[in-house]
Amino acid sequence: MDKLFITGGVQMRGTIRASGSKNGTLAILAATLLAKGQTILKNVPRIGDIYTMVDMLRALGADCYINGENVITIDATELRSSEAPYDLVKKMRASFTVLGPLLARMGYAKVAMPGGCDIGARPIDFHVKGIQALGAHVETGHGYVEAEADKLTGSEIYLDFPSAGATQHIMTAACLAEGVTVIQNAAMEPEIVDLADYLTAMGAKIEGAGTTTVRVEGVKELIAVEHSVIPDRMEAGTYAVAAAMTQGDVRIESAAPKHMEPFLLKLRETGAVVTTGEDWVRVRANSRPLATDVVTMPHPGFPTDMQQPFVALLSLAQGTSIVTENVYERRFRYVSELQRMGADIKQDGRTAVVKGVEKLSGAPVTATDLRAGAALVVAALAAEGDSEISGIEHIDRGYEGLVDKLITLGAQVIRADSERKGSALCSV
């Protein structure tokens, strides 16, 4: 497996472009199964999770083509299967969301239990509850979920937790149901609004996306359309943290500052100078960050996906910060890796007390999940000396062109296995 070798202590300076939203693209790719004809998705990130979902669509019979301009063309006119194979679903949780579109389109779906990053319990109960409320008969066993319905019927659905994945999943299935579906306590993430915009362009009738109540009036059919995915706020946020940690100056273009407001407000509390335009964010810092407390919450709260990189930032802060994780209970598994780099973090359950230190030191560390990997990368960029990051297959799931973007900002980073890394250094 390749590793990342980073020599830290270099201020990140320059301009990069944010890629399209990973989570937004995944939801839309699942929804392409609802329509016959050719769908064209633009601003699609070239990352591991997207390739996994494309493989899933192909396994179901859809024709998918990827070109070098971040565009995917999908034609789901002829679906050969309504069973999502285990070897794909186990790689990524989002692939489970093909269940609803398959059920709505074909009347039957069989999907393996989902996998993905081990960051805590992410039950499919909310998904299953929503599908059942639409009139489907659902059975779970032997590692699979099977759903069957002669037709789906609109219903009132209350989510016990505002799950973004469940909200998106129920929305897609409800588009082809008879009657009206109302989702109460719905998630409000920007990616849900983007999915609703895509579905509406296809002919769906959706109101309230981005609020706690989403209303979907079913239609008989949807048509394939062209759509451009919104920017990835988590990727943009990660580079913003890198700028603050290294006391640099980074401008992130093709971003959506309005989607990042909770995070950017907290970043300002650390002393970073944050300026924004309609589609760009600039982050500057010239001193150690200031301590601040963070509590993760569903949108519009502080995003759980930014907790790990932000803890890396706070590990260098002046003072003590308290970080509370309210979404996933095992999202602090990476703390021991930051401690190897000199971070002073005490973690108890869902809370971490981060006492800032003056410097971090490069060390061999391992990414345990996608955002943990991002935290280790930004920590290594700010640390003194050399770091070696393993487990970068997790990082590949969510960050397009990471090494190239970091090099553009001045980072000293190599991606290689240990043998090739030595050869690369000798040739310099």
Image (spheres, rainbow, N blue to C red):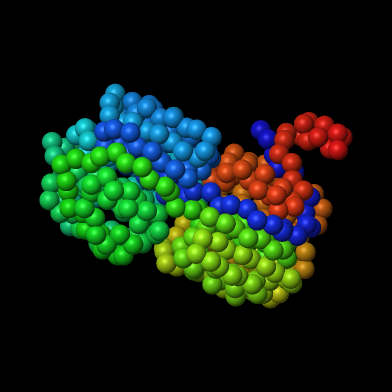
Q: Is residue 224 in sight in this rendering?
A: yes
As rendered, which of 151 and 406 lies closer to the eye? Answer: 406
Quadrant of the rendering where the C terminus is positioned? top right
Q: Position of residue 59 (x, y in %)?
A: 38, 26
In the image, is residue 41 above or below residue 133? above
Q: Quadrant of residue 9?
A: bottom right
Q: Position of residue 232 (x, y in %)?
A: 50, 53
Q: Residue at x 33, y 33 (%)?
A: 38
Looking at the image, residue 11 sits to the left or right of residue 119; the answer is right
Out of 253 and 272, give the one closest to the viewer. 253
Residue 316 left/right relative to 20: right
Residue ranking furthest to the top = 80
Q: Quadrant of the N terminus?
A: top right
Instruction: Compare residues 365 and 226 and report the one nearer the observer.
Output: 226
Look at the image and tell me whether residue 146 can be seen.
Answer: no
Q: Position of residue 342 (x, y in %)?
A: 75, 60
> What's the residue at 47%, 43% (across, down)?
44
Q: Residue at x 43, y 33 (%)?
A: 54
For the image, the number of numbered tags is 0
Q: Position of residue 72 (x, y in %)?
A: 44, 36
**Horizontal relation, residue 146 to residue 402: left or right:** left
User: Which residue corresponds to the image point at 62% horizontal and 57% vertical from the top-left?
Assistant: 239
